[in-house]
Image (cartoon, rainbow, N blue to C red):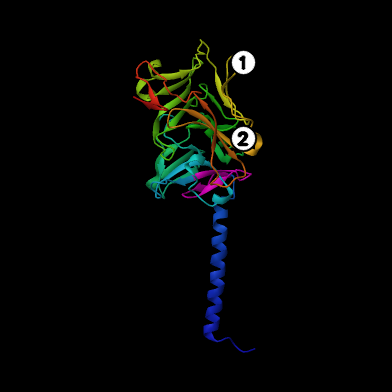
Amino acid sequence: MAALPRFRFGLLRLATLVAVLVQQARLLPVAMAQTNNLTAGDALTPPRYITSPSGGFAFGFRALDSDPTKFLLATWFRFADDANSSQPQPQSVLWFLKKTAMGTAVVATATSVLNITGDGRLKVTDRGDQELWSALTPSMQRGSVLALSDSGNVQFLGDGDIVLWESFRNPTDTLLPGQPLSSSYSPGGLLVSKRTDAEFATGRFSLAVQPDGNVVLYIDLFTADYRTTNAYWATRTYGPNGNTTVTFDNQGFLNYTLRDGSVHGLILPKGSNGGNYLQLARMDPDGIVRTHTRPRYGSGGTPWTVSGALPGDGGCNRVTSSKQGLCGPGSYC
């Protein structure tokens, strides 16, 4: 058989190399999102993320719309047409890492790393191993697995699958179906609004489940130190033993359960939503708690619909003792 001319052999090698590179490029986004956990020794770096077993949720580094070189460590709904994207709609972000419950978001860079250390700690570090955040876990407990479930809950697990830390007990502004909100989940009895839908800075409004059992909406809580003068709505369910829990169910009902087991409605949705819809309850930037819904199998661009709100009057004419009152939803004058 005659030898191939040199230039034809070179073209053959080039074609083979291009084919390999194309195949790797096709596989890379899948590799970034094919697992639903991290184990000791694994590391997650921007813009990588993990997915829940069904693929409906993602957890990892999400680029900021305002600055693509900066990232949030977040959980978001993962839709079919943005499966390979680390920049989902702001509305789809369900949880994001904050320094404290009432603090600012932890902003990561391209050099940041989320990992489980050799001594069983979950932490985020930046260049030079500077610690940006570490999970608060029970004393002397070592973790080995970080898992994202199909409920959207991120859990750091120790021996025997004991939960050492979880995002459901450290909420930001959003509740998912099945996620409780209670003052006993320190510091998990608080939802705090963002500054705007697209800005992850701390906003002015909060929903607090207090140790005395009262469920209260506040403006400027962090400068008021829980002063009742800054409350603009409350259940008035305070008592010596507290133990009230707010829950959001998969039918779209936002309820609170008292110590005696009685259940009371906060938001009753307009119509039944059920399993064919994605749902969330959120302390929105304008001071109104709303339940939002959209078809489960819609594309990433499918709009969300408001199914209920608290206060039910939209907040107009609400007053506090230390503020003049509302000029419109969430706007104090």
Q: Position of residue 220 (x, y in %)?
A: 37, 25
Q: Which residue is mark 2?
A: 161
Q: Amino acid at mark 1?
A: Ser
**In this view of the protein, which residue sits in the foreground, 52 or 9?**
52
Q: Which mark is residue 320?
A: none
Q: Which mark is residue 262?
A: 1
Residue 66 appearing in the image: yes
Q: Examine the image and state in which quarter residue 154 appears.
A: top right
Residue 141 appearing in the image: no
**41 up-or-down from 241: above or below:** below
Q: Position of residue 308 (x, y in %)?
A: 54, 28
The magenta stretch spans residue 47: yes
* Pointer 1 or 2: first along the chain: 2
**In this view of the protein, which residue sits in the foreground, 73 or 271?**
271
Which segment did they paint magenta? Answer: 37-60
Q: Position of residue 270 (x, y in %)?
A: 59, 29
Q: CA distance from mark 1 to mark 2?
A: 32 Å
Q: Residues within 10 Å of mark 2 (few under 14, many from 20)?
A: few
- In the image, what residue occupies the spot 42% across and 30% down? 286
Q: Secondary structure at mark 1?
A: loop
Q: Amino acid at mark 2?
A: Asp
Q: Position of residue 122 (x, y in %)?
A: 49, 39
Q: Secondary structure at mark 2?
A: helix
Quarter of the picture containing the N terminus is: bottom right
Q: Residues within 10 Å of mark 1 (few under 14, many from 20)?
A: few
The magenta stretch spans residue 205: no
- In the image, what residue occupies the spot 57% across and 54% down? 30
